[in-house]
Amino acid sequence: MSQIPITELLALLALLVLSGFFSGSETALMTLNRYRLRHRAEQGHRGAKLAQRLLERPDKLIGLVLLGNNFVNILASSLATVIALKLGGEGAIAVAAGVLTLVILIFSEVTPKTLAALHPELVAYPAAYIYTPLLRVMQPVVWSVNLITNNLIRLLGVQPEAGNGSALSREELRTVVNEAGAMIPERSRDMLLAILDLENAVVEDIMIPRNEVEGIDLQDPPEEIVAAVKRASYTRLPLFDGGIDNVVGVFHTRNAIGLLDGSGDVRERLRAIARPPYFVPEGTRLYRQLIAFQRAKRRVALVVDEYGDFQGLVTLADLLEEIVGEFTTDPADAYPEIHRADDGSLLIDCSINVRELNRAMRWNLPKRGPKTLNGLIIDYLETIPQPGTSLKLYGHPLEIIQTDEKAVKTVKSLERIAAGAALPGTTGGEADRTQCGP
């Protein structure tokens, strides 16, 4: 047996380390979180800036990495053959090939790639300092290789310059927010998800229906008008002239109180302080309506259908509550349609909007289709049930408490809630839900 070739073995060891560096750094750079990388680069992190520049042209980076990796692997194979010939002759070449394959697989591929996948920033940022000058030195070779490969890719109908399309869709953003875990507080996560949901909802989903809208009719006697304004529980009221289908304006009760005690025609005084009505279609998306409120500097909009008939009223406060939730700690305070019973159950007025019920109870009832709990129950059972009927509505046990020949009036939620316990769908503070906001 010949003397052990120490120099060749050390060279082989160095090549295996280089092979592991190329393999691990490739995985690290390609698995970097692009948004975290951009954030670190904007903060001035030098390694992040270099990595970001390298990833702007992934074809060049991959070409450089594979060029280096294949070069050291082939050189290591050749060197292992030389060492085998010196140690055992031609018969040892096959053994050397098998041992080298196993060593490269474990120490130069699987181990460094696993480490890089688990901690990409730990590997990618230092590697960027090496690849940046190396890319400049190897530019002619990398350019030649990329020229050939890019032309082959174009033959397959793919444009290398088109980028990797890193923009996320709305559903992908929902997944990112949901999986953020402790990095985003639960309350903030709920608000972010609610903002993403604004595009799926329309003003019809959150409006106050016409039969619940409180307003002032100018055709009523003056003394009734004055009394109605003084006892109004809302800050802004629509002004009708001969019925709810003829809205002539919206006025602030604070501006009206001082005018009603003086002399003069009450009707004309109210007309004078009322702003012209602001109409919106019932199918307007909530995020568009939020922008429209801001541009028009309005807080109240009257909702009309495709025929121009008055359907309800939507306010800026209602829209903001879609994002931040109700401004009370108890669902029975936040929602007049929900009342807490002594046994811990909740009595629910079936006129409540499905979206509001989902937000209050953290349920996931379908939002497409019937807009109210009454409509959802009738659609589910395909009949008007009798009091005492129990059902499981999309996984939530309910008991029918009160009905009439046309609708379900009240149900009891059989999901127990501790007295005084706040639900996740509400926030701290004490404020009354009002028709037209502050």
Image (tube, rainbow, N blue to C red):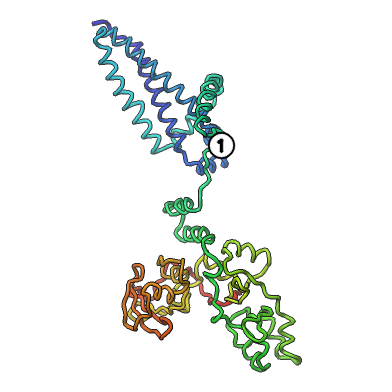
Answer with left or right where residue 172 lies relative to residue 231. Answer: left
What residue type is disc 1 on? Ala
Residue drawn where x is 41% and y is 65% of the image: 364
Work out which quarter of the rendered image holds the C terminus and state it. bottom right
- Answer above or below: position of 359 versus 238: above
Work out which quarter of the rendered image holds the N terminus and state it. top left
Element marked by disc 1: helix
- Residue 433 in percent (x, y) is at 53, 76
Question: Residue farthest to the top?
Answer: 2
Residue drawn where x is 64% and y is 80% of the image: 238
Q: In which quarter of the image is residue 7?
A: top left
- Answer above or below: position of 58 versus 304: above
Residue drawn where x is 62% and y is 83% of the image: 244
Answer with left or right where residue 41 lies relative to residue 255. Answer: left
Residue drawn where x is 60% and y is 85% of the image: 232
- Residue 193 in percent (x, y) is at 48, 58
Q: Nearer the viewer, residue 62 or 408?
A: 408
Residue tagged by mark 1?
Answer: 162
Q: Determine crowd level at label 1: few under 14, some 14-19, many 20+ residues with C-alpha closer than 10 A.
A: few
